[in-house]
Amino acid sequence: ARVGADARVHPSTSIGQDADGAPTLGDGCYIGPGAKLVGPIELGSHVIVGANAVVTRSFADGAVLAGVPAREIAHRESRADVH
């Protein structure tokens, strides 16, 4: 897996590889406790993954994810855009 700068990954999180590859996380991502990220997915910068979510596909910058399987429940501006 590749994890960007300033990412926060909580305990009991699984970031796993499958036969096709491993996840890539952008800068400033937050991965909640118990979340699972599997396969060659890409999460953009400042993505928030809620506790116990299961992420099996890619999401763009600023997505707020929750559920099994994870889906986008909100979108936020990246910190780079906030003054």
Image (cartoon, grey):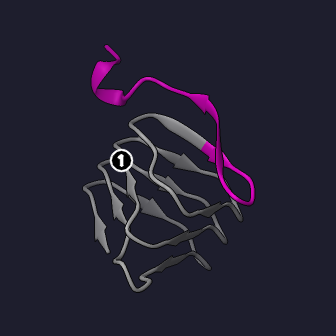
Q: What secondary structure is marked by label 1?
A: loop
Decide whether residue 69 is among the magenta residues: yes
| Count of picture labels | 1
Between 42 and 32, the residue placed more toward the observer is: 42
Rendered residue at 49%/53% (across/down): 30
Residue 23: quadrant of the picture? bottom left
**Can you identify the residue that label 1 sits on?**
28
Rendered residue at 41%/61% (across/down): 41
Residue 32: quadrant of the picture? bottom right
**Residue 60, position as x, y percentages in the image:** 41, 39
Decide whether residue 28 is among the magenta residues: no
Between 54 and 83, the residue placed more toward the observer is: 54
Between 14 and 21, the residue placed more toward the observer is: 21
Rendered residue at 64%/67% (across/down): 33
Rendered residue at 55%/28% (across/down): 75
**Residue 73, position as x, y percentages in the image:** 68, 35
Give the extent of the magenta segment. 65-83
